[in-house]
Every structure is written in C-alpha cells, then in structure tokens.
Amino acid sequence: MLNVWVVMPTCLPLVLRRCHTCASDRFRANGKFRVNAHHKLIDAWLLVLCTGCGETAKLTVLERTNVRSVRPELLDRMHDNDPALAAELLQDPLLRRRNRVALDWTDAWRLDTSGSDHSSPDPIDIAVRFAARIPVRPVRLIAEGLGLSRAEVERLVAEGNVVSAVRLGGRLSGDFTFTLKR
C-alpha cells in the first residue's frame, strides 16, 4: 500500500535581498504589482516590502516589453494584484536570477500526511509530492511525517530501515518515494 504525503505552501516565502534603507535582508511579498506603460512598451514589477523598515522594493517581471506580446490574462492578473500569480512568479528561476534574489521557505509550508497510519509491522511505501518547489531536507519531512526526531530518522537510514532511491542527506524540492521497514 502506497501512502502519499504532500508538501504544501501555507503562504508566500520571504524574499532574501539586502534592503538599501535599513540593511535588513528579508522582504515580504504581498501579491501587489505595479504596471507602467510607455507608448507600446510595458514594464511590470512585483512589489515586496522590507520586514525591517517597510521600504518597498520592486522585482522586475517585464521590462520594456511590447504590449502585444504580453498575454491579456497575465496583464489582467497583474492589474488585479493576483496573489497566486505572485506565488507563480516567485517560483520562476529566471525571475529570481534576473533580480538576484533567493527565497526563504522557513515556516511557509506544511506536510499533509492525510492521517496515514504508520503502526503496521509490514514495510510501508510512502510517496512525497511537492505542490510547489520548496527545498526541504527529506530527513526532516520523514521525521515530521512519522512523529520522530531527526536523529531517530538518521539512525533508521543508517540501519537500512528507511530506504529511498534518492539521497536523503541534502535538500530536495522534487517528488520522491521511500520505504519504511519495521
């Protein structure tokens, strides 16, 4: 029997970037956009607020782009300040690279195990699915899902009682499966 766990975002992650006003390094995205048109060209930014001083910074989404090349539904979503669009754009590696920012997912996700029972003496196969690309250590996910400490999970991995095709030591942001042997 295969149990499915889902790693789901609970809110937008913090944006890691240096504030020019107070030297803080964290910004909060609230889903607000600024769109500016110059004749047939358009600029669009995702606005983020400094967690220290409240100063607004702009993350470039579109820069001097021909208006006709922008999908009308994308433009409507930016005009409506769609928070789901902000979440999609923050996941875009090109946008993060262009703006030289990183994301901090601390306290911005949760693990949904859908009440699966792990007390069976038989081996249990568990598939972990990611609703968004959230980098998390697999050992932490397994510990949280099973209600164990990370040290106990690391001991189970070392003993061969937790087996996976992926390396459980680093961070993952993609789906994986593992088997728990009792």
Image (cartoon, rainbow, N blue to C red):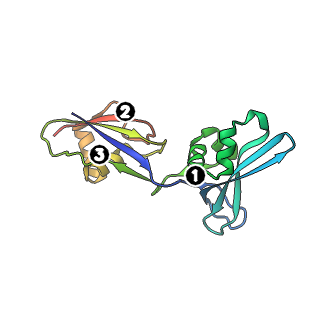
182 vs 100, left or right, is left
Query: Is 80 placed above or below 131 here?
Result: below
Answer with the quarter of the image where residue 65 lies.
Answer: top right
The spot of residue 151 in percent (x, y) is 29, 51
Mark 3 is surrounded, within 10 Å at the Cα level, by few (under 14), some (14 to 19) or many (20 or more) other residues, namely some
The spot of residue 34 in percent (x, y) is 72, 53
The numbered mark, 3 or 1, whose residue comes first in the sequence reads 1
Marker disc for residue 154: 3
Label 2 vs label 3, nearer the camera: 2
Q: Residue at position x 34%, y 45% from top?
A: 139
The residue that mark 1 highlights is: 83
Marker disc for residue 106: none
Alpha carbon of mark 2 to alpha carbon of mark 3: how far? 14 Å
Marker disc for residue 166: 2
Can you say which quadrant of the picture contains the N terminus?
A: top left
Mark 2 lies on a secondary structure that is loop
Query: Is 126 placed above or below 8 here?
Result: above
